[in-house]
Image (cartoon, helix red, strand yellow):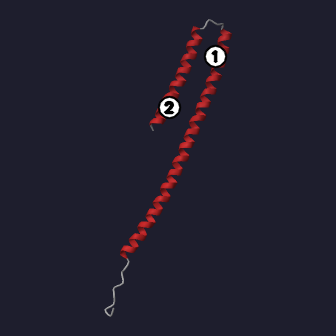
Amino acid sequence: MSDHDDFGVFLIGFIVGGVAGAVAALLLAPQSGEETRNLIKDKSIELRDMAAQQADMVAKKASEQADMIAEKAGEFTTEARKRGGELVESAKKAVAPRKRPTETE
């Protein structure tokens, strides 16, 4: 859970930092309006692409985690069924009537 939280904080910081840097660059750069609009367009495309890459990476990690959890759940279920069967057999043996020796023997 901690890894998930740390990654979410990183992702938010990355996006906010990128936007803040882009805004600062636009406000402080001595350019004409058309150059500024082109720069905004280019930076927004770059930011969109980075966000898409991050989203793909998050989706891939989530899928990997889901697969791992499903595998572990399957292993747990198999082991629980096996142990349950063993317990049932052990209980049957414990309560089964035992043969008493006959008086002639």
Please tell me how crowded label 2 is: few (under 14), some (14-19), or many (20+) other residues with Cα within 10 Å. Answer: few
Single out the residue that lies furthest toward the left: 103
Secondary structure of the residue carrying tag 1 is: helix
x, y percent for residue 60 = 59, 39
Q: Quadrant of residue 104?
A: bottom left
Residue, disc 2: 8
> Total of numbered circles in the picture?
2
Q: Quadrant of residue 18?
A: top right
Give yes or no for contact between labels 1 and 2 (Cβ–Cβ under 8 Å).
Answer: no
Please tell me how crowded label 1 is: few (under 14), some (14-19), or many (20+) other residues with Cα within 10 Å. Answer: some
Left or right of residue 43, residue 9 in this image: left
Q: Amino acid at mark 1?
A: Ile
x, y percent for residue 24 = 55, 13
Q: Nearer the viewer, residue 73 or 52?
A: 73
Secondary structure of the residue carrying tag 2 is: helix
Q: Nearer the viewer, residue 41 or 95?
A: 95
Residue 50 sits above or below residue 20 on the image: below
Q: Residue at x 56, y 15 (%)?
A: 23
Q: Quadrant of residue 21?
A: top right
Single out the residue that lies furthest toward the front: 105
Q: Amino acid at mark 2?
A: Gly
